[in-house]
Image: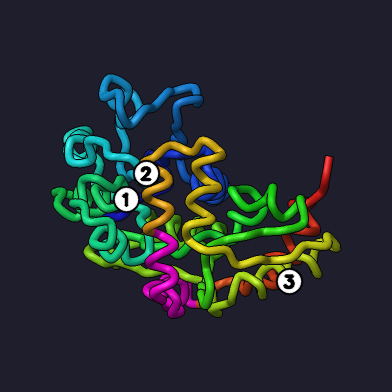
């Protein structure tokens, strides 16, 4: 069931790190892309099923970037198939099953796991992309402010991680959405090398010219900091479990998914950091 350039591809979470890159990549390749989020011309809300029909109208394939929190994943997958979607691809977390088990909850309690299960249980062709944490967390996400302030502190003593460029995730997503041969596969995606957070911060400092240091803090210190910052309790619980899984080394090994799909290695962190710095990722003001 090939996906042609005349077929409409729905990208949820189209304003996020991966979603906007995927939308741009598919559009540049000549595909008819419908990118949706709560703020797009066709508004889409995971928790408002009345917004689904317009988003799904006439689509042949769907890229699912789920919310962190629980949502009606099975209902969405069924609605997508009923609307004519022949292919569903879900973005998930690296070994999300491990995180769910560590949290002591069921799959439905974590959006990525619920979406993965719903896609796998659908009547469509399906593929799951399980990605490590993104390089862009340091340039666009939660860690950027700390980088600019000169110090990043996290509860990651002894942790190394092969974080991944979101552009590589988008490239893999574009391939599995439009090419055949990926049905029924779960691809684990990571960068090409596992680095400590101190090494990552040092690379960013050298690439950006910003003096920045890394400090390891205890899990208790980090939890207290998140609470004092007013983060929602469910997010605090999720992050605590994520860091626990990282400290146990459960997602520290390098995955081969990027090379399996694209036939090339993933982008190295230093190469990504040099590119990000050239694009002004850490420019102040």
Q: How many marks?
A: 3
Q: Residue at x 78, y 66 (%)?
A: 205
Q: Looking at the image, which is closer to me, 177 or 137?
A: 137
Q: Are marks 3 and 1 in contact (CB under 8 Å)?
A: no
Return the residue at label 1. Answer: 112
Q: Residue at x 43, y 80 (%)?
A: 253
Q: How far apart are marks 3 and 2 (CA)?
A: 30 Å
Q: How crowded is mark 1: few (under 14 residues within 10 Å), some or many (20 or more)?
A: many
Q: Is residue 172 visible?
A: yes
Q: How crowded is mark 2: few (under 14 residues within 10 Å), some or many (20 or more)?
A: some
Relative to 135, residue 25 above or below: above
Q: Nearer the viewer, mark 3 or mark 1?
A: 3
The image's mark for residue 68 is 2
Residue 143 horizontal side relative to residue 68, left or right: right
User: Residue 70 lies in what quarter of the image?
Assistant: top left
**Of the residues under marks 3 and 2, which one precedes in the sequence?**
2
Return the residue at label 3. Answer: 202
Relative to 91, residue 253 above or below: below
Q: Are marks 3 and 2 in contact (CB under 8 Å)?
A: no
Q: Looking at the image, which is closer to me, 86 or 271?
A: 271
Element marked by disc 1:
helix
């Amino acid at each position: 069931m090939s996906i042609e350039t005349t077929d409409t591809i729905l990208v949820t979470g189209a304003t996020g790190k991966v979603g906007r890159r995927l939308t741009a990549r598919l559009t540049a390749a000549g595909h008819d892309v419908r990118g949706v989020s709560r703020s797009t011309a066709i508004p889409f809300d995971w928790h408002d099923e009345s917004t689904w029909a317009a988003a799904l109208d006439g689509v042949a394939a769907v890229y699912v970037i789920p919310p962190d929190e629980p949502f009606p994943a099975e209902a969405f997958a069924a609605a997508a198939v009923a609307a004519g979607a022949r292919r569903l691809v879900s973005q998930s977390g690296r070994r999300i099953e491990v995180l769910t088990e560590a949290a002591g909850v069921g799959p439905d309690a974590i959006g990525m796991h619920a979406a993965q299960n719903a896609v796998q249980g659908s009547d469509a062709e399906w593929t799951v992309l399980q990605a490590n944490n993104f390089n862009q967390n340091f340039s666009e996400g939660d860690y950027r402010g700390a980088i600019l302030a000169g110090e990043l502190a996290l509860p990651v003593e002894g942790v190394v991680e092969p974080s991944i460029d979101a552009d590589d995730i988008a490239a893999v997503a574009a391939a599995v959405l439009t090419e055949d041969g990926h049905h029924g596969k779960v691809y684990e995606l990571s960068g090409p090398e596992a680095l400590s957070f101190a090494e990552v911060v040092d690379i960013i400092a050298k690439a950006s010219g910003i003096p920045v240091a890394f400090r390891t803090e205890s899990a208790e210190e980090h939890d207290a900091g998140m609470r004092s910052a007013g983060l929602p309790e469910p997010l605090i619980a999720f992050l605590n479990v994520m860091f626990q899984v990282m400290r146990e080394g459960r997602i520290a090994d390098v995955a081969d998914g990027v090379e399996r799909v694209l036939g090339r290695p993933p982008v190295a962190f230093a190469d990504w950091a040099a590119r990000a710095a050239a694009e002004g990722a850490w420019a102040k003001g």
